[in-house]
Image (tube, grey):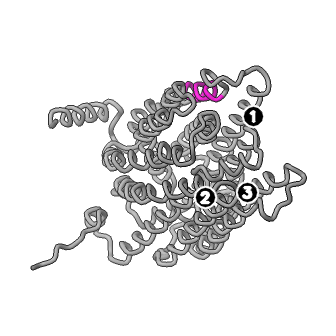
Amino acid sequence: MERKKLHSPFTALYDEENLPQKIRRSIMMMIFGNLFGNLWSTITSSGPALTGLAAELGANDFIYGVLTAIPCVGTLMQIPAALLVSKTHKRKKYMLLYGTISRAVWLIIGLVPYFVPMDPSWLRIWSLIFLVGINSVFGSFINVCWTPWMADLVPIGIRGRWLAVRDRIISVISLTVGIGTAYILDIIPGYKGYAIVLGIGSIFGIADMLSFIGVENVPMKTDASAKISDVFKKIFDNKPFVKFMIFWTIWCFTSNLSGSFYTRYALGDMALSNTEVTLAGNVASSIITMLIVPFWGRKLDFYGHKPIFWFAGLISAVTPLIWLMASPGSMWVMLLYNLVANAFLCAVNLASQTSLLSYATDDQRPNYIAIYSCFTSLLGSFLGTLTGGAVLQTMQDSFIANNIALDHYKIIFVVSAVLRLVVILIFVPRITNNREFEMTDLWKDFKKSVKKLVSAK
């Protein structure tokens, strides 16, 4: 009997653009790297491990805000990193070297309680913050190398759908790892569990970097002879790019004002276990992303990013209000939030990635990405997380009672929702779309899809 051939879900997309075999192999190795990188992120920065370790070391809301925000400071290094990459065209060398060092630092982070003395009491938590900062500084080369590299390999005509299929595959595989690491933290309490989990995360991170050994180092399109002053002038004269960067910076600020504290709130005041937080958090997010992101990828390629920002942004903006129903042990609230929020946040994030690549010109793309990352990370994510931590700590220490019915966390969640809604209404109209469509076109299409789904049942 003739065996059935297994076809890659990317094959049709590659055929559409007639990509040569060596480019297809390179993109596949890049997908492996993205998978390992996502597993690294799930275990280290976005999972309960770092939050739990910080709590064990005595971090209050403000110190926790500093810890989760400090990686954004490392983005300052992206500007010199981008200039160096643009001049030398050695992005593969720099990414493999500095990226691997960055991910290896997490092996040390998990061991902080074992080699840093307990006295004085602040030394361990600030050692943790310092090491996370070191990881971020070395990791600054990753973003300015990887994103332009991906743009050089994956044509713009299929980029939205390619990102959607990639994210779907990554979401499926991330489920098992997320549950496994949470289980380890629950059965091995204390510092030993954190050391094991963060060590595993570091190994995944290193595997991410090593995957790029097999990626074709296609010629960069950047102009190596351009003067630094001319580069910056050209970037800031690009009005559509500047408008988008301002919008995304303020969106990141309002999102991180509350978003960085969901896991801390669930593990603390809501008294959920690591496994419950992972199931209601990372696992729920991965499942909904896996199911819905292909839909958004198709719509993004057809309608462009502006209608997606309008439609998905308006809905995702108000989802923090779901946390108002939270009470001790109410795992379902976190589950509901992650299912609803990520059904639309995945679309917003897809739109932001394709927007950046469409606005950034080929001749200086690494520098565009570096400047964009500095603004969005420092003035957006870093300042938002730090402000959220400071406000939470001030409210807790002064006039807000420790009452989960309307505690200081819920107040900051409501403020974040209102501000995000305002950001969408004010800034999205100023964004230039890369297609000849508006939000009304997407809304009509969406209603048709819902009617078709209902009638099919």
Query: Does the image show residue 42?
Result: no
In the rendered structure, the answer to whether residue 332 lies left or right of residue 383 reads left
Q: Nearer the N terminus, badge 1 or badge 3?
A: 3
In the rendered structure, the answer to whether residue 115 lies left or right of residue 335 reads right
Query: Does the image show residue 292?
Result: yes
List the residue tagged with mark 2: 367
Mark number, residue 390: 1
Q: Is residue 62 above or below residue 152?
A: above
Residue 222: image location, x then y, percent: 55, 66
Residue type highlighted by circle 2 = Asn
Q: Residue at x 64, y 59 (%)?
A: 193
Q: Nearer the N terminus, badge 2 or badge 3?
A: 3
For the residues labelled 2 and 3, say whether their Cβ atoms are less than 8 Å apart: no
**Mark nearer the viewer, 2 or 3:** 3
Q: Is residue 397 above or below residue 304?
A: above
Mark number, residue 133: 3
Image quarter where the N terminus lies is bottom left
